[in-house]
Image: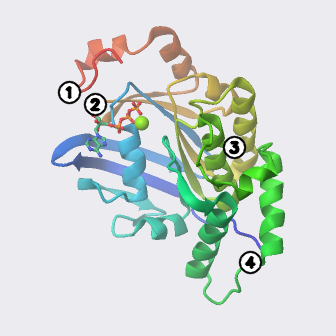
Amino acid sequence: MQDFSLRGNYVKLEIKQLHVSIEDKEIIKGFDLTIKQGEVHALMGPNGTGKSTLAYTIMGHPKYQITSGDILIDGESILGLSTDERSHRGLFLAFQYPVAIPGVTLANFLRMAINSRNKAMHPEDKATSIVNFRKQLKAKMDLLKMDYSFASRYLNEGFSGGEKKRAEILQMAMLEPAFAILDETDSGLDIDALRIVSEGVNTLSGDNLGVLVITHYQRMLNYIRPDFVHVMYNGVIVESGKADLALKLEENGYDWVREKFGPQEDGPQNA
Ligand SMILES: Nc1ncnc2c1ncn2[C@@H]1O[C@H](COP(=O)(O)OP(=O)(O)OP(=O)(O)O)[C@@H](O)[C@H]1O
Ligand SMILES: [Mg+2]
């Protein structure tokens, strides 16, 4: 069977002294993080500290201006690359708020995504046969315990919150990136779905995937064990630790961060 995977193709994602502005307002203010193949990093922090901004910036969203700093994959800057070129370098983002695309079925969307990536990366190869694609899709839907009927529904249209999150992880399962950023994939999932999605991520991760899990809650980290936990506040990482840091946050909230670093600029102070 043709292999779509980019897992293991790239080994290191580095974010160096990154500064990012939106409409001339600085949101990210000197962010440093290195994610290596096989590592799971959790990024936590109060609302409005710039976590999603970071995720979008890594993927190359045009609205976010990088004023200084760099993002590198295996030592090469990706700042000059378009979003699809970044996906060819193994990057994948599961959105906090997935958008609906009426008129495009989930299966067609995935097939187009895979074919266009394969075509760009291996122009000499023939497109995957529909039979082969369907086989892979079924296997990945089984892994995520998704009903096959979802494949023929329009992408995210009328999907429940949890179904949208599962569809995001199905995209990750099909595209098999080298680095996956999961932006609040746990929000909106019921307890069973959280376990199924987490187990799916674990099955897909292992030694050759680097993962950045953005979350507010410890619960997903019970399943996807992070090697490192980082607290983002006011556009920077203010604390890093091991998995127990997430437990400390769950117990104590962020008051200690506010006391130590002052109120968040322009942000919700009690979020
Ligand atoms: N497109 C945009 N236009 C204007 N302001 C924006 C835009 N995107 C983000 N911001 C602002 O940037 C700040 C950081 O937002 P971001 O979504 O990155 O926070 P977050 O850490 O992901 O928060 P949450 O935990 O609530 O998801 C917020 O003050 C937000 O209002
Ligand atoms: Mg966010």
Q: Earlier in the sequence, mark 1 or mark 4?
A: 4
Mark 2, residue position: 234
Q: Looking at the picture, how far across and down is residue 241, in whole percent?
A: 49, 27
Q: Is residue 260 above or below residue 227?
A: above
Q: Is residue 136 left or right of residue 116?
A: right
Left or right: where does residue 12 sit relative to residue 190?
A: left
Q: Element under label 1?
A: loop
Mark 4: few, some, or many residues within 10 Å (few <14, many ≥20)?
Answer: some
Q: Badges 2 and 1: C-beta atoms under 8 Å apart?
A: yes
From the image, tell me which residue sits under label 3.
201
Residue 265 has which mark? 1
Q: Which residue is drawn at 34% across and 50% down?
A: 16
Q: Which residue is painted at 37% across and 27% down in the image?
A: 47
Q: Which amino acid does label 4 sit on?
A: Thr
Residue 217 locus on image (x, y percent): 55, 23
Mark nearer the viewer, 4 or 2 = 4
- Residue 128's tag is 4
Q: Which of marks 1 and 4 is in front?
A: 4
* Amino acid at circle 2: Asn
Instruction: Name the image quarter holding the C terminus.
Output: top left
* Among numbered discs 2 and 1, the one appearing first in the sequence: 2
Direction from residue 121 to residue 205 in the image, left or right: right
Task: Tell whether label 1 touches label 3 (CB within 8 Å).
Answer: no
The residue carrying pointer 2 sits among few (fewer than 14), some (14 to 19) or many (20 or more) residues within 10 Å by Cα, namely many
- Along the line of sight, the residue nearer the viewer: 7 or 60: 60
Q: Which residue lies furthest to the bottom in this view?
A: 124
